[in-house]
Amino acid sequence: MSTTKILITGITGQDGIFLTSHLLKKGEDLKIFGITRSNKNNNFYKNLHNVTGKYDENNLDLIKLDLLNQNDVEKLLTDLKVNKIINLSGPSSVYNSFQNTDEYKNIIINQFNNLVKGCYLTNTLPTFFQASSSEMFSASEQLPLNEFSKMEPRSPYSEAKYALHNKVYELRNSNDWNIKSGVMFNHESEYRLENFLVMKVINSVIDIFNQKTSELIVGSLEYKRDWSYAYDIVKAIDLIIHEDDPVDYVIGSGTGNTILDMVKFVFEYFNFDYQDYVKVDSSLLRAGDPTNIVSDPKLIYDNLGWKTEVTFEEMLTKIIEFKLNTKI
Ligand code: NAP
């Protein structure tokens, strides 16, 4: 058997770190090529080492490349002739997408389009996983959300993701291509970007503990989301890219937790009563956002035996402890 060549775009992000680690730890005959826009990747290597421990460095190459440069992408794919592509690249904040609407959408869509054009050139059509999002679902759809639930994007970010979700469907039907879209629900970890809610809550409570601030302001305590630990989610991606059938799966825990659940847990970890510190300012909420979002991951469990293993509370504890070790 020849070495399996796997291209991971967005490798330096939260999911890229865990996916790379998971693949390296499996000890299979593989070579990972990771795409990043940066040539300063010390943090990536440090984080990867934290999660993985020792690994064979020959199995991983980082490549500095801008996926918006079509010529570079085509050359890369022609040279490497990879067997699998996992497209995790692109800006990932729904909130920021409202600030630069067109630019945001164009980046997400053009990075994907360049990869697809490059795949055509290689004439091999590698197995392709596209990172889609639960943000694509209609706010008025009944819960829990599954592969058949209605989609109706509510942000520039989800409009771009939805356009590509549909494109994936077209591409596989017109080319007999094992290309698929993974509809991922919120997932978090110690490597999540700092502007996401879970990081805001944990950083604020640590700052309260250190007497650097005295309050935490959130948009709602009632909103319910399906939060998973990112390492669990990348295990699903691994199973999906090894499946011969091109199936689009909903990937989530199937359990909803409220922002209050999160806030209470984090404050209690520090022996604080959240009521002494938390203020609610509903102007922070995004118009049109649903109150509750919860997945129904039955299909991926039935087909691939996947389900999340790390609980919501265990996930929060991991992030808090990581932050405490690096912040205090
Ligand atoms: P992330 O931490 O934001 O990582 C994405 C990576 O994309 C970055 O590390 C960055 O790497 C690269 N990138 C390329 N062009 C970019 C640009 N113009 N702006 C910002 N980053 C750019 O995301 P993640 O949480 O790992 O998520 C992976 C994928 O899953 C994303 O496509 C995201 O939209 C999707 N997703 C995530 C969630 C979630 O809850 N985390 C849920 C559903 C879907 P370099 O700077 O090294 O180039």
Image (tube, grey):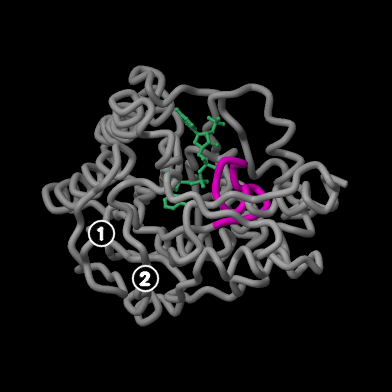
51 sits left or right of 113 in the view: right
Q: Nearer the viewer, mark 1 or mark 2?
A: 1
**Circle 1 SS class:** loop
Q: Position of residue 73 (x, y in %)?
A: 39, 25
Q: Is residue 314 magenta?
A: no
- What's the magenta bit mostly, secondary-structure-wise? loop
Question: Upstream in the sequence, badge 1 or badge 2?
Answer: 1
Q: Which residue, given by chain and number where applicable, does mark 1 sit on?
A: 139
Residue 285 screen position, x and y as percent = 41, 48
Q: Residue at x 77, y 54 (%)?
A: 322
Q: Position of residue 241 (x, y in %)?
A: 41, 58
In terms of image quadrants, where is residue 89? top left
Disc 2: which residue: 295
Q: Residues in magenta? A: 188-200
Please count the marks in the image. Answer: 2
Q: Is residue 95 above or below residue 272?
A: above
Q: Give the image location of residue 274, x and y in percent.
A: 68, 64
Q: Which of these two is toward me, 140 or 91?
A: 140
Looking at the rendered structure, the kind of residue marked 2 is Ser
Q: Secondary structure at mark 2?
A: loop
What type is the residue that disc 1 sits on?
Answer: Ala
